[in-house]
Amino acid sequence: DGAVPVDYHAPTAYLAAARSGNLAMMRWLREVDGKGVEVGILDVFGEVARRGDTTMLAFLYESHLGGRLHGDADSLKLVRRVACAAATYNHRNVLSQLVTLPSPTPWWIHEP
């Protein structure tokens, strides 16, 4: 019926869906509990980047960032998490996707 179970924990469910590659579940969780899935979102982005899933990353970029980086500290943390995971697992496609996201300033020129 679309209702969220009583014992549901949004961040855990969202991360589990990311780990299993279940994009349909991620879309549903985002729809029913948009604020709940924001908790621990860096871990979700990192997990999806580790898996090399550019389709799921496109969904995450669009639904959580409006399809663009914002140049703030949170965006930079996200970029670092995705870039480190992608580099560690040699997912060049993930890095290519990351550098094409619109950003007010190039994220790679910021100091760590």
Image: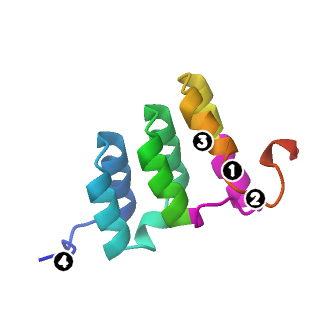
Distance, label 4 to label 3, CA atoms, is 34 Å
Whether residue 61 is situated above or below residue 83 in the rendered picture? below
**Are circles 4 and 3 on residues that touch, CB within 8 Å?**
no
Quarter of the figure that contains the C terminus: top right
Which of marks 2 and 4 precedes in the sequence?
A: 4
* Residue on which the image places disc 2: 73
Whether residue 54 is situated above or below residue 105 in the rendered picture? above
**Are circles 2 and 3 on residues that touch, CB within 8 Å?**
no
Residue appearing at x 48%, y 56% in the figure: 60
Query: Is 66 a magenta residue?
Result: yes
Q: In which quarter of the image is residue 69?
A: bottom right
Distance, label 1 to label 2, CA atoms, is 6 Å
* Residue on which the image places disc 3: 97
Disc 4 crowd rating (10 Å Cα; few below 14, some 14-19, many 20+) is few
Task: Tell me the amino acid under the disc marked 1.
Answer: Lys
* Residue on which the image places disc 4: 3
**Are circles 1 and 2 on residues that touch, CB within 8 Å?**
yes
Task: Tell me the amino acid under the disc marked 2.
Answer: Ala
Quarter of the figure that contains the N terminus: bottom left
Disc 1 crowd rating (10 Å Cα; few below 14, some 14-19, many 20+) is few
